[in-house]
Image (spheres, helix red, strand yellow):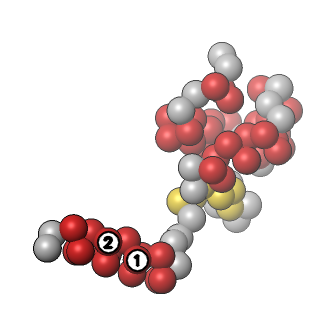
């Protein structure tokens, strides 16, 4: 299976499931599946996911308050 060609949102679900059920680290997963860790992380980072070593999972990056404010203003402005 060519994981790196998958949609990032589907990929993160598969990778997190494998990490939770079968692997104690991202390095182990990448070694076992023959994945380039850097390429995997870049692909998921572009979709706003970051690897958390403590939980051994990719997590959604939190947006800063200013970015959330800009999104809110743009959405609100379109209404008027």
Image quadrant holding the C terminus, namely bottom left
Residue at image position (77%, 26%) is: 33
Q: How many marks?
A: 2
What is the C-alpha distance between the residues marked 1 and 2? 6 Å
Q: Which residue is mark 1?
A: 70
Q: Which residue is mark 2?
A: 74
Residue 69, x across and y down, in percent:
39, 81
Quarter of image, res 29: top right
7 to 63, vertically: above or below: above
Residue 27, x across and y down, in percent:
83, 44
Residue with the most extreme top position = 1
Pick the front one: 68 or 22: 68
Image quadrant holding the N terminus, namely top right
Residue with the most extreme left position = 80
Residue at image position (68%, 29%) is: 4
74 to 14, vertically: above or below: below
Of the numbered discs in the image, which one, if any, rests on residue 48?
none
Pick the front one: 22 or 17: 17
Q: Is residue 34 left or right of residue 2?
A: right
Residues marked 1 and 2 touching at CB (< 8 Å): yes
């Amino acid at each position: 299976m060519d994981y790196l060609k998958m949609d990032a949102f589907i990929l993160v679900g598969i990778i997190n499931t494998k990490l939770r059920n079968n692997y104690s680290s991202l390095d182990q997963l990448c070694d076992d599946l023959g994945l380039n860790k850097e390429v995997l992380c870049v692909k998921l980072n572009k979709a706003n996911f970051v690897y958390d070593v403590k939980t051994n999972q990719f997590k959604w990056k939190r947006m800063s308050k200013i970015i959330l404010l800009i999104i809110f203003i743009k959405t609100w402005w379109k209404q008027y």
